[in-house]
């Protein structure tokens, strides 16, 4: 009787996971830069230091806050554009799928000595669903961040906080 070779263990796709983490962190870094240039740099004009020094409350004009919010919404829209994020997510999903297919191929080759053909066509629909879920998570994160920033700027300006304090809260 012919002795079978030892079947290799399934390996986690650490390279793909690290790359996906980097992609997500890059999106967050782009969003943080948009927040800095679109909101934080505009706060000194929004919150008048002289009024705060004199002890008067400063109610920031709503239209200025609305303009900041709309500008940030436009920047976020370009950063987390659904088509762009979908392509990034699908590229990662395909990389993981290819890696796993290679792992299974090595295992079946070692076990039965035959390389099985690609019969996982059904996975493509699952990759699409995976991409859809991830795109929704990323766009939801951007929308929640936008709402938080708008509320923070409005509350800070109405409370008469210094622009540095509002900026620190916004950049958390």
Image: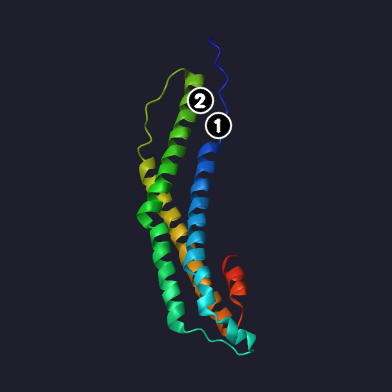
Q: Quadrant of the N terminus?
A: top right
Residue 80 appears in the rendering: no
Please, which residue is most extreme toward the top here?
A: 1
Horizontally, residue 128 falls left or right of residue 102, namely left
Q: Which residue is mark 2?
A: 107
Residue drawn 59% across the image and 84% down it: 50
Residue drawn 46% across the image and 29% down it: 102
- Residue 165, compared with residue 141, is above or below; it is below
Horizontally, residue 129 falls left or right of residue 52, namely left
Residue 136 appears in the rendering: yes
- Residue 99, compared with residue 5, is above or below; it is below
Please, which residue is most extreme toward the front here?
A: 50
Q: Which mark is residue 131?
A: none
> Is there CB contact under 8 Å for labels 1 and 2?
yes
- Residue 119, compared with residue 53, is above or below; it is above
Foreground residue among 109 and 32: 32
Residue drawn 53% across the image and 87% down it: 59
Crowd band around label 2 with a 10 angstrom C-alpha radius: few (<14), some (14–19), many (20+)? many
Scheme of colours in the image? rainbow
Mark 1 vs mark 2, CA separation in Å: 8 Å
Question: Circle 2 sits in a helix, a strand or a loop, which is it?
Answer: helix
Crowd band around label 1 with a 10 angstrom C-alpha radius: few (<14), some (14–19), many (20+)? few
Residue drawn 38% across the image and 59% down it: 78
Foreground residue among 41 and 135: 41
Foreground residue among 35 and 91: 35
Question: Circle 1 sits in a helix, a strand or a loop, which is it?
Answer: loop
Q: Position of residue 30 (x, y in %)?
A: 48, 56
Q: Which residue is mark 1?
A: 10
Q: Position of residue 100 (x, y in %)?
A: 48, 34
Q: Position of residue 126 (x, y in %)?
A: 40, 46
Could you tell which of marks 1 and 2 lies nearer the N-terminus?
1
């Amino acid at each position: 009787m012919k002795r079978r070779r030892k079947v290799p263990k399934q390996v986690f796709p650490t390279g793909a996971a690290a790359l996906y983490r980097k992609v997500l962190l890059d999106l967050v870094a782009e969003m943080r830069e948009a927040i800095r240039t679109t909101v934080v740099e505009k706060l000194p004009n929004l919150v008048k230091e002289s009024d705060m020094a004199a002890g008067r409350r400063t109610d920031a004009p709503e239209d200025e806050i609305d303009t900041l919010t709309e500008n940030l919404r436009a920047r976020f829209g370009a950063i987390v554009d659904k088509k762009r994020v979908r392509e990034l997510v699908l590229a990662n999903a395909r990389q993981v799928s290819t890696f796993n297919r290679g792992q299974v191929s090595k295992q079946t080759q070692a076990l039965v000595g035959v390389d099985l053909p690609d019969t996982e066509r059904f996975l493509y629909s699952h990759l699409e669903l995976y991409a859809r879920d991830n795109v929704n998570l990323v766009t939801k994160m951007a929308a929640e961040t936008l709402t938080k920033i708008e509320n923070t700027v409005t509350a800070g300006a109405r409370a008469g906080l210094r622009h540095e304090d509002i900026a620190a809260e916004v950049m958390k």
